[in-house]
Image (cartoon, helix red, strand yellow):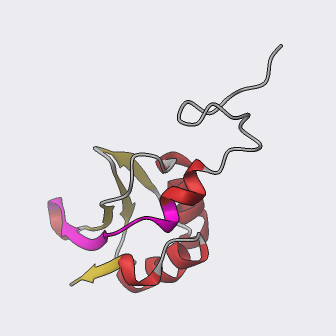
């Protein structure tokens, strides 16, 4: 069996830095709350680069915040209001602080 290679750069996955570069070059991440049926709140993280693995980022966010959620339409949706808690986690994940925009 051969090694898996990155679809973007062609390097083996263990040497690939595409997602790290995408995080550093991220320009605008919008974090906001949407109201859903019966007044439930959902924290939405939108504007992430296509080169970022949304599923794995979503999994780490859900584990850190002890909540459920999903990824769809290029954005991450977390069950509950985590507006103020998401930014520090994204910064720890390597996203620039000045690219994260919180909307009340």
Q: How many discs appear?
A: 0
Picture residue at 51% right of the left edge, 73% below the top = 90
Tell me which residue sits at (50%, 63%) in the image.
23
Q: Position of residue 17 (x, y in %)?
A: 64, 51
Image x and y of residue 41, in percent: 26, 70
Name the quarter where the C terminus is drawn: bottom left
Tell whether position 33 is magenta.
yes
Q: Please provide the residue range marked out in magenta.
A: 23-37
Q: Residue at x 48, y 77 (%)?
A: 96
Residue occupying image coordinates x 51% and y 46%: 55
Tell me the quadrant of the picture where the N terminus can be found.
Answer: top right
In depth, the one of 39 and 28 nearer the eye is: 28
Instruction: From this view, report whether residue 9 is shown above or below residue 102.
Output: above
Q: Image check: 72 left or right of 8?
A: left
Task: Locate residue 20: give its quadrant.
Answer: bottom right
As for residue 14 lying within the magenta part, the answer is: no
Nearest the camera: 100 or 80?
100
Is 102 located above or below residue 33 in the figure? below
């Amino acid at each position: 069996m051969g090694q898996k290679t990155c679809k973007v750069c062609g390097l083996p996955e263990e040497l690939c830095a595409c997602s790290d570069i995408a995080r550093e070059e991220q320009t605008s991440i919008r974090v906001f709350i949407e109201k859903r049926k019966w007044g439930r709140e959902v924290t939405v993280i939108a504007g992430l680069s296509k080169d970022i693995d949304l599923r794995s980022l979503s999994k780490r966010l859900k584990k850190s915040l002890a909540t459920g959620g999903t990824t769809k339409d290029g954005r991450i949706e977390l069950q509950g209001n985590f507006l103020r808690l998401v930014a520090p986690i994204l910064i720890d994940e390597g996203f620039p602080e000045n690219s994260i925009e919180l909307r009340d």
